[in-house]
Structures are given as C-alpha cells and as structure tokens.
Amino acid sequence: MEALLSEAEPLQGLVAVARSGLVRDWDAATLRRALGWGRFAQHLHGRLRRRAAGGRDLGRLRRCPELLSLALLGNPALPPPAYRHLLRGLLRLPAGEDGDGLVPLLARRRAAAQLLGLHPAPPSPPPVEPRVPPPLRALAQLLLSRLREEEEQDGEGGEGPSPSSSAALLDRLPGSPGLSRALAAALLEPPPAAAARLVLPWLLQRGSPARLAAFCRLLPAPWLAWLCGRYPELRAPYWGLLAAWGSRLRYHPRRGEWRGGGGGSGGGEGEAGEAPVSWTELRGRVGCLLEEPEPLRGETRTQLRRLRARDGDFEVRGLSVWTDLLLDLG
C-alpha cells in the first residue's frame, strides 16, 4: 500500500506542471508521454480504491487525464504542434468509453471550442515531381540510351529484344550509390514505359532483395513515394520493405519511443549488415506515401490496417508500430 501511495504523490503534480511554463519545450511525443502518465494515475486510483487508502482524497488521481488536458488547453506556453495533437486526441473518443462525467465533457467541449476558433489550415499542394539535378539527369539519360542500344543489338539476332540484355548490362555496372541515384533519375524520365521496361525488371528481380533494399534506403522518401505513384509494380515490394523495417523496431516504455531492435535481417528483406531504420525515418516514409493522391494513399492506409490487425489490432500506443503510425498520421 505504501509503495502505491508513494507512486501516487508525484503523479498528482502532473497538473501543476501542465499549467506551468515547463511545457514550452514539449513536442507531440512529450505530450503523449504526459497523457500516458495521466492514464496511469487513473489506473492507480482504481487499484488504491480497492484497498484502504488511509482516508486520503484520491479523487484527483481518478480525474487526472481530464484535469491534465484542461490545464494544457488553457496554457498558452504549449507549442502549436503539441496543442493540435491534444485537440485531436480529445475530440476522438476512445473505443469503449461513453464519455459520462462533467470533467471529461468539459475537456472535450473546450477542445471543440478551441478547434472552431482556429484558422483552417491551407489545403496541401498537389504532389510535385521531384527535381533531379541536371548532372544526374544527364547521367540517367545516358544510362537509358545505353540500355536501349543494348536492347536493339540483342534484337538484331531476329528473336526481338530481350529484357535480359539490359539486365546483363546493369549487372556489369559496379554497384554504388551513384548507380542507385541514376536508376531513380531514369525512372523519373519521360516516358515512363521505357524505364519500366529497361530498369524495373532488374530492380525487382526475385532473389535479389538486397538490391531493392539498398535502392530504397538511399533515395529520399518523397522520391520513392512519387515513384510508387508512377509505377504500381513498385508498391508491393516497397510495402514489404517497410513492413520488415517496422517489425525490427522495439518500444521502450520508459522513453516512450520506438527504437531499433538490432534484429539482423529479420523480416526477410535487406542485408544483415544494413543500418536499422529509425522510427523517424519509417514515419517519414509512410507519411510521404499518405500524401500522394489516390489510389496510393488509400492502398497505403489499407496496408497499415492489415499490419495492425496482424499485430492484434490494438488501439493503444506502444503495442504495435502500425497502430502508432495510424494514430500519428491519421
């Protein structure tokens, strides 16, 4: 009992912190951790209530999540990104909760009033094709020209051009970051049919997952999202890589964050020695896919839901990386 009460004392100071200027440096992740401690205080109240609490008033523990939210809503020091995250969380009633009670109702009504007072965000601009530096574009055009020559020479034998001719040339080229960038720039060149015929079969060749993994790790997330929008056959392999990278992340409750698990080549994709993908990188890559127009946006959301269902379809943070991505990215 005394151990539980000792845990309860600092938790009751959360509301005071939420009213102070200490929240000035809070981001969305810090806010989520604070709200998580508020829910823990509510859970602790339930445990203490079932025992003798020495006549102490523990009502603030039970109402800690709502009191904490009200204090943060009224604190002008809370940065706008964390403030918007708080509003979204309050207006989304968790499954299984009926919302009875004056304090929760006040918190949600105040959040709604604050949201109505905000200026609407400007609409997101349509996706723009990535800008390829002129030297890299020249290299990509040269590569495509050389692949076409190889294809034409192969077709002079009377059997017509074969994809194996361009693949054989690419196999002879030294693997390097420069080659991956040139291939990406070639895939961005018009018309897309030429690059799809000359480059994609080699890039997506079965039995060479490390090739695609290295290609995807090297390229910026907006480039890959745009390429997935242009070439549907690239989507499933890229989603497979994202799933493998995400499965290696492990949640650290004390830090309240996902970190690399160091699980080697688990998931079947990539090389054993590749650097682990961080939560920030994974979130950025998935976020870029969700910023693309339909059908890619909807297909990506469907993939995230399938992965979440595979992990148990939890709605609570920290149990599935896919749940956290869906909650963060909407």
Image: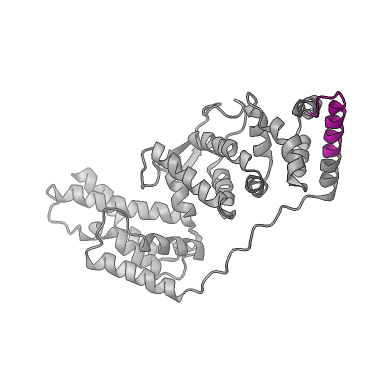
Percent position of residue 34, x then y? 39, 54
Determine the image quadrant of residue 138: top right
For this orientation, the residue located farthest to the front is 158
Above or below, comparing residue 290 to residue 218 in the picture: below
> Left or right: where does residue 152 sit relative to residue 286?
right
Assign the N terminus to one quadrant of the image. top left
Q: Which residues are magenta?
A: 143-161
Percent position of residue 278, x then y? 55, 40
Above or below, comparing residue 197 to residue 330 in the picture: above
325 within the magenta span = no
Q: Which of the colour schemes (rainbow, by chain, secondary structure, one colour) is used?
A: one colour
Percent position of residue 152, x then y? 86, 31
Main secondary structure type of the part rendered in magenta? helix
Residue sitting nearer the eye, 279 or 309: 309
Percent position of residue 89, x then y? 39, 59
Residue sitting nearer the eye, 196 or 223: 196
Q: Residue at x 51, y 37 (%)?
A: 243
Residue sitting nearer the eye, 145 or 253: 145
160 within the magenta span = yes
Above or below, comparing residue 309 to residue 202 in the picture: below
Q: Residue at x 23, y 68 (%)?
A: 102
Whether residue 187 is visible:
no
Q: How many marks overall?
A: 0
Whether residue 306 is visible:
yes
Q: Residue at x 19, y 47 (%)?
A: 47
Above or below, comparing residue 193 to residue 297 in the picture: above
